[in-house]
Amino acid sequence: MSAKDQPAWSEKILWGTLNALERYLYSENFIVANLTPYEEICRDGIMSVRHYLPLEESEITIGDEVVPVSRQRHRVPLVLVPPLAATSMIFDLLPQRSVVRFFLAQGFDVYLVDWGEVTEDHSHLSLETYVMEWMPAALQQVRRHSGEQEVSFFAYCMGGLLTLMYAAASEDKHIRNLVTVASPIDMHQSGLAGRVLSLVYRPANIASRLLNFSLLDLPARYLHIPGWLNSLAFKLTNPMGSVISTLELLVNFWDREFVTSHTTVSQWFDEMVDYPGQTIKEMLVKMGLENQMAKGRMMMGDTSAEFSAIRCSVLAFAGDSDKLVSIKAAHKVLDIVSTEDKEFCVVPGGHAGVFAGSNAPQNTWAVSAEWLSHRSD
């Protein structure tokens, strides 16, 4: 909207007041996530699997670009895997910034694994639950529903780690392609937290042997992390960004479209999901202190997940300004898998931006779609 098309200040104040009042009383009126039609094809406890229906439009708007909807379908279905702290809404965030709609338009048959709403009652959920129970159950239904054995994955952050764990532990030979976005394989290379983990590892290991005690011995409920704490921790990685975002909302309250977009995206950061205590214990010890993924082997229950067993095509992304996952931490995936068909891309954006920011469609999404299209027929 140009300056001369903008309403007068009196109108801005009026519409700003009305929008602010409505947002305060009925914030759901401004939420436009999860609007793409889908059918639920599987449910196991709080975990479910969605199959998204083909787009009816001939073209859609993604970002500022009009994208034609392909009527030719790729044979290999695409499975989206979210992280644990963020809900599945991040894959269908806004109509014009939806990973789901983008890949549907590119001719992919799109499925999504929804890990569900974790509460304190689910503190017992472990990495083994996600990797050895729910992932196989989800893929069984995807394969039954699609009629195809081969599948591709597009996974964000912790979702990428869970997918890699599954691929290594199961040695599933029907995984065709795997795309990871901002997934920290090498925890000791991931920012300040990584350096702390690296320094603490040896003293903690010695203390554990001397005291005959491990964090894994603690009751899971003691390490259960509520969603509000996940949200706070995420915002603290960029406190100035949170302040600027709030100021932008105050200035643009008159613009309903802006308020809708801002409110929807804010829900991603404000309403994160609990982290199960048992999962946190295993992440701290196995993935954090011991850095097992970076070393190429990780125990999943009684199963040794050997990452060298992964031979599918791999594409990995890192954000050039990601304060949570460093480029080195994300690049490590190329060192632990055995496939010869592997690529690594550094794209613009922080931890959220690299996946769903305004530049993601022409970078992470477009590169992934082209890469997958050559490997999905």
Image: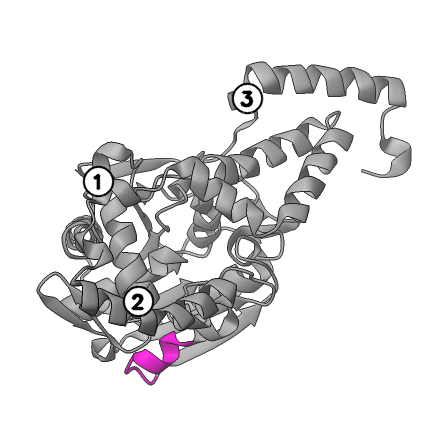
Q: Which mark is residue 204?
A: 2
| Residue 318 visible within the image | yes
Q: Position of residue 289 (x, y in %)?
A: 32, 66
Give the mark, 1 or 3, whose residue is nearer the N terminus.
3
Tag 3 residue: 27
Q: Residues within 10 Å of mark 1 (few under 14, many from 20)?
A: some
Residue 198: image quadrant is bottom left
Give the mark, 2 or 1, whose residue is nearer the N terminus.
1
Kind of residue indicated by mark 2: Ala
216 to 61, vertically: above or below: below
Q: Secondary structure at mark 1?
A: strand
Q: Is there CB contact under 8 Å for labels 2 and 3?
A: no
Give me the residue at 30% from left, 67% from top.
204
Q: Residues within 10 Å of mark 2 (few under 14, many from 20)?
A: some
Distance CA(mark 2)–CA(mark 1): 44 Å
Give me the residue at 38% from left, 42% from top.
88
Kind of residue indicated by mark 3: Ser
Give the magenta part as a residue range.
Answer: 332-340
